[in-house]
């Protein structure tokens, strides 16, 4: 079992910054991706950013140039630096891990609220 604990959410004004962190613990083997999804009220959960063990990153078009994902393998931690925040970034952000299994297995954090005021 893998446990993911997120931190760093909160309330910020438009144009502000927040940094989310996610620490993984437990039976962690063969991670393919670590990353973040988000879900706004009334909307589907969407991928925000993910990063491979080799450091390859993928971002949603809506956050490119504003968000940066990074990982610290020694600490099993993935971070999301969010700059130039907009009200439309308001959502619950979920950390996740996808392993290399076929089919893949996933682990999810409990979610952290990010609210951007206009």
Image (cartoon, helix red, strand yellow):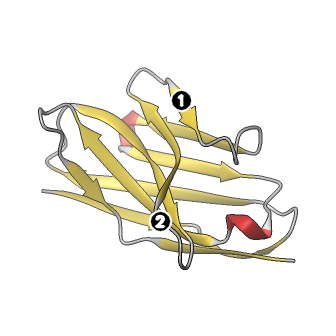
Specify the quadrant that holds the N terminus.
Answer: bottom left
- Left or right of 114, for residue 26: left
Q: Secondary structure at mark 1?
A: strand
Q: Position of residue 92 (x, y in %)?
A: 52, 72
Residue at 70% across / 48% down in the picture? Answer: 62
Real-space Cα separation, disc 2 to disc 1, in angstroms: 22 Å
- Number of marks: 2
Q: Position of residue 59 (x, y in %)?
A: 59, 38
Q: Nearer the viewer, mark 2 or mark 1?
A: 2
Q: Residue at x 47, y 65 (%)?
A: 44
Left or right: 43 with respect to 1?
right
Q: Which mark is residue 85?
A: none
Residue 109, placed above or below residue 118: above
- Please tell me in which quadrant of the rendered image residue 103 appears: top left
Q: What residue does disc 2 label?
A: 44
Is 76 in front, or is 31? 31
Find residue 84 and report its horizontal and vertical position in percent: 83, 55
Query: Element under label 2?
Result: loop
Q: Nearer the viewer, residue 78 or 13?
A: 13
Q: How packed is label 1: few (under 14 Cα within 10 Å), some, or many (20 or more)?
A: some
Q: Nearer the viewer, residue 47 or 53?
A: 47
Image coordinates of residue 43 in percent, x first then y, are 53, 70
User: From the viewer's perspective, is 28 left or right of 6?
Assistant: left
At 60% from the left and 43% from the top, the residue drawn is 60
Residue reaching furthest top? 54
Q: Is 57 above or below relative to 98?
A: above
Residue at the spot of label 1:
57
Return the disc, 2 or 1, that comes first in the chain's sequence.
2
The crowd level at tag 2 (other Cα within 10 Å; few <14, some 14-19, many 20+) is few
């Amino acid at each position: 079992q893998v446990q993911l604990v997120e931190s760093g959410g909160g309330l910020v004004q438009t144009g502000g910054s927040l940094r989310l962190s996610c620490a993984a613990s437990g039976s962690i083997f063969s991670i393919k991706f670590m990353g973040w999804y988000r879900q706004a009220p009334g909307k589907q959960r969407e991928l925000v950013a993910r990063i491979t063990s080799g450091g390859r990153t993928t971002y949603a078009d809506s956050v490119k140039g504003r968000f940066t994902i990074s990982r610290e393998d020694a600490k099993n931690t993935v971070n999301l630096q969010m700059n130039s925040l907009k009200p439309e970034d308001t959502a619950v952000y979920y950390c996740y891990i996808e392993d290399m299994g076929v089919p893949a297995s996933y682990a999810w954090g409990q979610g952290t609220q990010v609210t951007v005021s206009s």
